[in-house]
Amino acid sequence: MTMLFLDRLRRHSLSQPDKVAIELLTPAGPQSLRYGELERQVGRCMAWLLALGLRPGACVATQLPRGLAFVQLHLAICRLGAVHLPLNPAFPAAELRYFLADSGATLFFHAADHPGAASIAEATPDLTCIALRDDDSYTRQIDRFEPVAPPPPRDPQQLAMMLYTSGTTSRPKGARITHGNLTANIEALHEAWGWRQDDVLLHVLPLFHVHGLTVALHGALRAGATAVLTPRFDAVSVLDLLESRRFSVFMGVPTLYRRLYRAAAGRSHDLRHLRLMTSGSDRLPDDLFEGMRQRFGVTLLERYGMTETGMNLSNPLRGERRRGSVGLPLPGVEARVLDRRTGTPLPDGAVGELQIRGPHVCAGYHNQPGQTAAAFTADGWLRTGDLAERAPDGYFTLQGRAKDLIISGGMNVYPPEVERALLEHPDVRAVAVIGCADEEWGERVVALVVPEAGSAPGQADLEAWCRARLAPYKVPRVWRRVGSLPQNALGKVRKAVLREAFCG
């Protein structure tokens, strides 16, 4: 049987106790934890959690900034057989109350300056709320305890985490992620991306999300590598770091890569020493794919994942990293494209719903048997809700969310195709394409355009640009100039918000 992630991490603490596992960059200087020290600190944290009454199977919520305290709490919670629910530090009290109530959390660790902490504690008397001012206050808490010995290896079917979906069209759902799910995905990525013990990851992603936590951080720790965490993302500082230190791995989202690309304008940067730079969580624009290659000498590796699964598909580490494609199924992952109406497999080149199956897929949704039944087929395939097509050589290309598909005059319009065309226009900085109800056409194609600074592209110009690149029925019929687009924590455009604002 494959060794579970937490057990492999303990093995690293014994085989390389003096190697740096985590380094946190702070204004006062770097703070680091070596693998042996990380193991001892997690043992102390486990003792503290046990003293607080934590029992296996209980849910522990955290809403903390990026730091060493978060990492240790995460590992200790999972090692004790409890369920970790990491939450976005930006969530206001109203949203927090939903997550805490729905998850049934019994412990809640939050920043001491959280403005809604008092109201949450008052509204949920059965919840133990613990304020942490910073990493030092956390360390003072756990230093009162002697490390406890790690428990026997966990059952792969036991829950390790609960991660809530983005909830762009309904209330967020808690994906139930087991130790087996985590391990299967980490092992697949370890093989596919060639993680090495001498890798050094510059980590700039949120730790409350699957991308930053279970892909980036877990990936580095599984390999026995080093993860260097920045307190926040600043494009100029990150560029300087990437050049001044011999980082080998960097993971980002298109929004971050766009900022890096712009920050480097007029400056010389060579990032060819990085062996792996991945992009995900949203579609990578074609111009950015090419721009990163020309400006920095790197070819981004685009991949596809989701909250319920971790990573599913990836362009190869060695081989063609195809522009516009999210690549091939990872080891142990099955992927297929089906007709959404009939449920029958589609031939290569046809667009349908992407379905995924494998040991990395979550164990359903928390307290939502109806949603779980709707999301899974009888033979275990997850209906992702994403539209995709498969090329004859096995590469997959996403065509947007099924709920974002526009049917205008009986013809299917895939928003990513229209967006890609518009993003090639020199005066377009960002764009979102949505469908709004129309009495004559069923839906009309609406383009919400963020122009480049100092530019004001006219509707006639944009229409002509699209007509030269798209079939007539795909050309937007309504154009709106906007200052910005609403995004979630990882830069993905919230189209449900746009439809509500512009389709009324």
Image: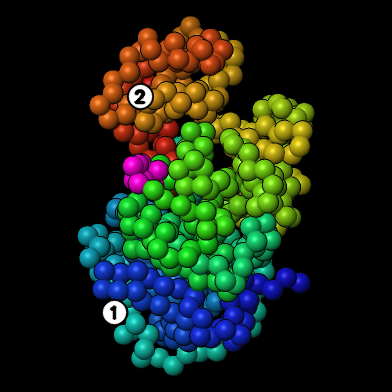
Give 452 or 55, whichever is nearer the viewer: 452
Q: Residue at x 49, y 23 (%)?
A: 421
Q: Is residue 167 left or right of residue 27?
A: right
**Horizontal side, residue 374 vs residue 145: left or right:** right
Q: Quadrant of the N terminus?
A: bottom right
Q: Determine which residue is flagged by label 1.
A: 137
Gap in Å between the C-alphas at discs 1 and 2?
A: 49 Å
Residue 75, above or below 45: above
From the image, tell me which residue sits under label 2: 427
Dot 2: element: loop
* Image point (35%, 37%), residue name: 486
Q: Position of residue 287 (x, y in %)?
A: 48, 33
Q: Position of residue 189 (x, y in %)?
A: 64, 59
* Left or right of 301 in this view: 380: right
Q: Is residue 262 magenta?
A: yes
Q: Is residue 7 visible?
A: yes
What amino acid does circle 1 point to?
Ser
Image point (34%, 82%), residue name: 139
Extreme-bottom residue of the structure = 146
Q: Picture quarter containing residue 69?
A: bottom left
Residue plotted at (58% across, 31% down): 399
* Amino acid type shown at disc 2: Asp
Q: Residues within 10 Å of mark 1 (few under 14, many from 20)?
A: few
Quick check: 340 above or below 411?
below
Q: Could you say where residue 335 lies in the image, as x and y percent from the top left?
A: 71, 43
Front-most of 495 and 261?
A: 261
Question: From which residue to which does the magenta span run?
Answer: 260-267
